[in-house]
Amino acid sequence: MEEYNSGDEQAVFNADDVNISVKECIEGVIGGADYNQSKVNQWTAGIVQHSLTHLVKQGRPFKYIVNCTIMQKSGAGLHTANSCYWDTAADGSCTVRWENRTMYCVVGVFAVAL
C-alpha cells in the first residue's frame, strides 16, 4: 500500500500501465470473436466501461476520457488524429491498437489531472 499513497508517483500518467490495462479489457470483451456488426455497439460500450472502471480503481488523481473504435478488416484505411491543449507535465494520453484476424480495435485514453 505504500506505493498507492506515495503522492507524486500517483499523479504521473503512465501510458505503459494504461496500455496493458486497456488491452486486457479488450481481450476480456471481444476475446477471440470474429467481427459481427450486430455486436459492435455492445463491444465498444463494454470496452469503454471496463477500461474506465480499471483506470478509476487505480486511485490516481485524473479525470478520464475513453473512446473506442472497432472496424472490420476489409482493406480500407483508417486514419485518426487528436490534439489537446493541456498541461503536458500533468496530463497524458495514449492510443491502444489491438487486432485479430477479422477486426481492428483502437482505444484512446485521455487523463486530465485534477
Image (cartoon, rainbow, N blue to C red):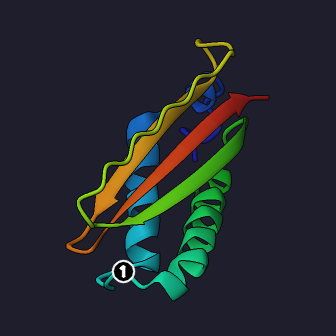
Nearest the eye: 97 or 70 = 70
Against 45, residue 39 (above or below) is below
In the image, what residue occupies the spot 69% across and 43% down?
64
Q: Is residue 58 visible?
A: no
Relative to 47, is 49 on the left or the right? right
Nearest the eye: 106 or 53 = 106
Instruction: List the residue tagged with mark 1.
Output: 35
User: For residue 113, which quarter of the picture?
Assistant: top right
User: For residue 2, which quarter of the picture?
Assistant: top right
Relative to 99, is 41 on the left or the right? right
Residue 5, percent across and down? 65, 37
Q: Amino acid at mark 1?
A: Tyr
In the image, what residue occupies the spot 66% across and 40% down?
60
Within 10 Å of disc 1 (Cα), the crowding (few <14, some 14-19, many 20+) is: some
Q: Is residue 50 visible?
A: yes
In the image, what residue occupies the spot 70% across and 30% down?
112
Q: Residue furthest right?
A: 114
Residue 92, percent across and down? 56, 27
Circle 1: element type: loop
Which of the image's four quarters has the C terminus?
Answer: top right
Residue 96, percent across and down? 40, 48
Nearest the eye: 20 or 82 = 82
Against 30, residue 12 (above or below) is above
In the image, what residue occupies the spot 65% across and 62% down?
53
Relative to 24, is 73 on the left or the right? left
Against 107, residue 74 (above or below) is below
Relative to 22, is 7 on the left or the right? right
Against 44, residue 16 (above or below) is above
